[in-house]
Amino acid sequence: MCSTPHRYRTVPRALDHADAARLVDEVQAEYAQLYGTPDEAPIDVAEFAEGNGRFFVLYLEDGVGDSSGADGEPVATGAWRWIDAPASLAAVGATRVAELKRMYVRAEHRRQGLARRVLAEVEADAMRAGVTHLVLETGLLQQPAIAMYRAAGYVDLAGFGHYVESGLSVALWRQVAESDDATGGVRTSGNS
């Protein structure tokens, strides 16, 4: 018996959209289970509004038209938002920096390449907006996530942001494009 490959679609959503909010609640519950508390870093709906960043939900479309909803079943999220360059990147001239946020795949959909798919779509969208460097913080206990980021080319970065002093935080970065200073535009980096 042959199984049919799943069909997925990534859709930009507001952070407070019902599907986005449900998946954010799920990842917060996972953080609480792993670390004893949900992620306490502040985020705001406006940070992911057009021009400030973008939030995505990945839908499994196999069940479109059934009880999973018009868009299918929401199974993963990922987002980016503009931030001021952390000091260690600013020191090397990085000025068009964004932070990856809320990368999450529901447990029953993991180990199928969906996190890499969402990461690639988030990176591509950020580059279209002019981002040259992406940074992220993730938890030390989330080793599969750290391995996925490292495999995608992310390298260590000095701590920054809300968890700068946390021994349980891992900060990573990747240059995704080169700034074209002559035009103010962005050229895609060879490592993307």
Image (tube, helix red, strand yellow):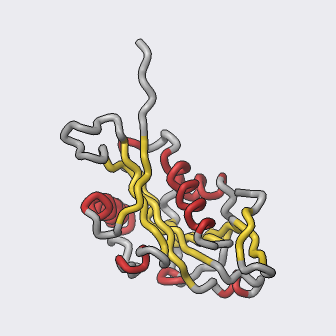
What residue is drawn where x is 33% and y is 71%? 38
Which residue is painted at 68% across and 83% down in the image?
A: 95
Taking the view exactly as shown, the residue that stands out farthest to the top is 1
Residue 116 is left or right of residue 46, and the answer is right
Question: Would you say residue 33 is visible in this rendering?
Answer: no
Q: Quadrant of residue 72?
A: top left
Left or right of residue 182: residue 150: left
| Residue 1 makes an appearance in the image | yes
Residue at the limit of the structure toward the left, as seen here: 67
Instruction: From this view, report whether residue 43 is shown above or below residue 120.
Output: below
Quarter of the picture containing the N terminus is top left
> What residue lies at 29% left-to-right and 36% top-to-bottom?
63
23 relative position to 12: left or right: left
Image label count: 0
Question: Which is more toward the observer, 37 or 192?
Answer: 192
Residue lying at 67% horizontally and 69% vertically, measured from the top left = 156
Residue 143 position (above or below residue 134): above
Q: Indicate the position of residue 184 as horizontal and vertical percent values.
A: 72, 80
Q: Position of residue 153 (x, y in %)?
A: 69, 58
Question: 31 and 168: which one is in front?
Answer: 31
Q: Quadrant of the C terminus?
A: bottom right
Picture quadrant where residue 22 is located: bottom left
**Residue 144, percent across and down?**
53, 52
In the rendered image, residue 37, in percent from the top left (x then y), is placed at: 33, 72
Q: Is residue 6 above or below residue 189?
A: above
Specify the farthest residue to the front: 183
